[in-house]
Amino acid sequence: MAEYTDLESLHAALSKCRLCAEAGYRIESRPIFSGPPSARLMVIGQAPGEAEAPAGQPFSGDAGRRLFRWLERAGWDEETFRATCYITSVTKCFPGRRPTGEGDRVPTAAERRLCRPWLEGELSLVRPEVIVPVGRLAVQVFYPPETRLADVVGSSIVDEQGRHIVPLPHPSGASRWLNDRRNVGRVEQAILILRRLRLELGL
């Protein structure tokens, strides 16, 4: 994949990407992402969902409403956050529903590998100071693959590039993980960490 010197060029190329379709994966939307190149905070989700496909905007459905309730408690209103922060995902296109019809299909490891250079390009060009990986697949970008959400949500690390990594669970209403009261407490701690970083870094 070519190297891009600015986010606009990367977005133009990404919008034309057909790698997954050419590899035989059924992709049901074009790439979805948003945010300015000056963003100092980046949210990385798993993949666009069914609601995001027609809206063309990340986290537009029920999961997005819950995510923005968390972020509001950390000090950002949705309008300001969308205008100043960058929102993307591990894979950029809506992967379609599960074969059973219950919920969205989880992108395969092969799809994630095909899409990874796009994410690396976004990280390289935006250069965020704070990264919020949302859900297991996004967390695995920054932590070992065997890492459990319960081990990292509610904590943060500073990686080799000096970026603060603050994991969150996927905010889907279907997430069983959030039914555990201990996990709800972990989310509360993550919100406190984000609030502290917002104030300390002037985000």
Image: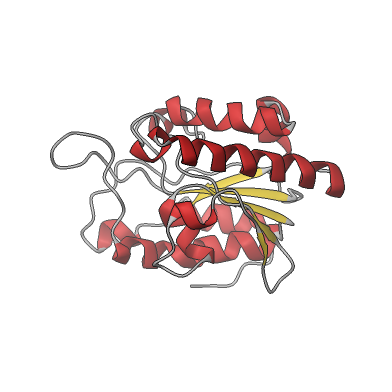
Position above or below: 96 against 112: above
Residue 51: percent from left, percent from top? 39, 28
Residue in front for this viewpoint, 69 or 92: 69
Residue 39: percent from left, percent from top? 73, 48
In the picture, residue 186 is in which quadrant?
Answer: top right
**Colouring mode (rainbow / by chain / secondary structure / one colour):** secondary structure
Residue in front for this viewpoint, 67 or 90: 67
Q: How many marks?
A: 0
**Taking the image as drawn, is residue 49 in sight?**
yes
Residue in front for this viewpoint, 50 or 62: 62
Residue 1: percent from left, percent from top? 48, 72
Left or right for 20, reference 90:
left
Position above or below: 187 against 55: below
In the picture, residue 162 is in which quadrant?
Answer: bottom right
**Taking the image as drawn, is residue 202 in sight?**
no
Position of the C terminus by quadrant: top right
Q: Residue furthest front?
A: 182
Q: Determine the residue positioned at 55% across, 38% down.
A: 185
Q: Determine the residue positioned at 20% across, 59% down.
A: 24
Left or right for 88, reference 104:
right
Q: Determine the residue positioned at 44% across, 46% down.
A: 31
Left or right for 202, reference 118:
right
Residue 166: percent from left, percent from top? 62, 52
Q: Determine the residue positioned at 36% across, 36% down.
A: 175
